[in-house]
Image: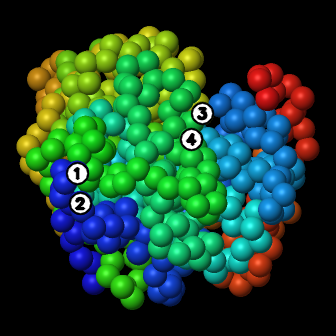
Amino acid sequence: MVKNNHVRVYKSEENLAREEQLAHKIATVAADPVEVTPLVAEMIINRIIDNASVAIASLNRAPIIAARAQALTHAPTTNGKGSSVFGISDKVSPEWAAWANGVAVRELDYHDTFLAADYSHPGDNIPPILAVAQHTGASGADLIRGIATGYEIQVNLVKAICLHKHKIDHVAHLGPSAAAGIGTLLGLDVETIFQSVGQALHTTTATRQSRKGEISTWKAHAPAFAGKMAVEAVDRSMRGQTSPVPIYEGEDGVIAWMLDGPDASYEVPLPEAGEPKRAILDTYTKEHSAEYQAQAWIDLARKLHGEHPEATDPANVKSVLIKTSHHTHYVIGSGANDPQKYSPTASRETLDHSIPYIFTVALQDGSWHHVDSYSPERAGRPDTVELWHKVTTVEDPEWTRRYHSLDIAEKAFGGTVVITLTDGTVITDEIAVADAHPLGARPFARQQYINKFRTLATGLVEASEIERFLAAAEALPELGPGELDQLNITAAPGVFDLAAAPKGLF
């Protein structure tokens, strides 16, 4: 069973025993040789397919072009055969494959999510763990074990420790989880993983300005950087190098000075010895390319498009009020006080964090597309801008309570919409979870993951390569040592021109 571990700040003279430190407990979980359950293994395959689909769809986007170009300047290192980069057959050093693939997976904001005390995209663990697995010649079973740990640690940190209220970016939970997952993959001892977790945390704490105001291309790079740091932290720890101790609980550590301060305390759930790692089953993916809190709102807007076409015309609408959770209101709603969220010239990264924009376009179009819905032409359409500026959000305490509920059956990421028409008619509807959520109207299963991959890969990957990749992914548990290169995907000829990539320092 899962055990809650009390975590607080300790003064230096209290000399907290290593075995009682959170980083050491994380390492102990990572080193536990417990078998992965069939349900978890199946979901890991789903998420590998999911990551690949969104990475392929982003191959020609500027952040991916730049990150791929950087990676290609770093050849495989001497202690392994190198790691694959999505879209090409070239091999690079594993930390740079983690970087390039991490950016590709994250760019479209289109892969899995877990939300609790903090936020996360736990699929961000897969690129660094897979890169190390390919470099070291690991097996499919090894990779499954490593990914199960990555998800377990990140989800449990996210359940217990809030970063965002202190304006610390959520990738601070990703560095430690990826390092732990790599430790499991490689079968490292507790002490080495402990040092890796501490170094990864120490080097991946950053501010949330990357997700505020005019959101930049760094949003996609942030988790890739955390994954790259995790790979490097493991390498250093394997060479006997140590980390700040205690990294979480120390008098000058992360909790005392970056989070809730010297009087803080948390209850962090972690599996006990011999307990399977199941946390991936609490996570959920995206049907739509947008911030996760927008998923349910896109589904509700599509429904209202069909039921109330009159609400799509701004001439008929007086106001649109979205009652939702604290997070949705203050981070992607009007409560953020970001004028960019209402600007038709805002970046794509900003628009996918604007619920007023997303709801408006989905309401008018009755659909959502990962490229077309964000185009400058679509954002600048006069009737859209007029309706968009009539949409506001407000926090509703009940939806906030449900958002933070620890009961998965009650946890919700939606809210209530009240559309007031100019003739006085009031249209009210609500949604708790996205249609693709495990408790939604159309939960994602293996076939939906495959369909998502086929849809996003069409035109970018040859049909034979699509089928080859899907067969390899579904056969993951049987892939032997050195066979994980089969999880890479090669783009069709002419999809991109490597020589046209921007030049930099490397």
Q: Are marks 1 and 2 in contact (CB under 8 Å)?
A: yes
Q: Which of the 4 quarters of the picture holds residue 135?
A: bottom right
Left or right: where 367 falls relative to 161: right
Q: Nearer the viewer, mark 1 or mark 4?
A: 1
Q: Earlier in the sequence, mark 3 or mark 4?
A: 4
Residue at mark 1 to residue at mark 2: CA–CA distance: 6 Å
Question: Which residue is tagged 2?
Answer: 15
Q: How many marks?
A: 4
Q: Earlier in the sequence, mark 1 or mark 3?
A: 1
Question: Which residue is tagged 4?
Answer: 225
* Amino acid type of the residue that numbered disc 1 sits on in the rendered structure: Ser
* Amino acid type of the residue that numbered disc 2 sits on in the rendered structure: Asn
Q: Nearer the viewer, residue 421 or 211?
A: 211
Question: Which residue is tagged 3?
Answer: 371
Residue at mark 1 to residue at mark 4: CA–CA distance: 31 Å
Residue at mark 3 to residue at mark 4: CA–CA distance: 25 Å
Residue at mark 1 to residue at mark 3: CA–CA distance: 52 Å
Q: Nearer the viewer, mark 4 or mark 2?
A: 2
Residue 299 on image: x %, y %: 37, 47
Q: Secondary structure at mark 4?
A: helix
Q: Nearer the viewer, mark 3 or mark 2?
A: 2
Residue 31 on image: x %, y %: 48, 77
Residue in the image at 62% along x and 72% along y: 186
Q: Residues within 10 Å of mark 3 (few under 14, many from 20)?
A: few
User: The N terminus lies in which quarter of the figure?
Assistant: bottom left
Q: Residue 418, relative to residue 441: is it above or below?
A: above
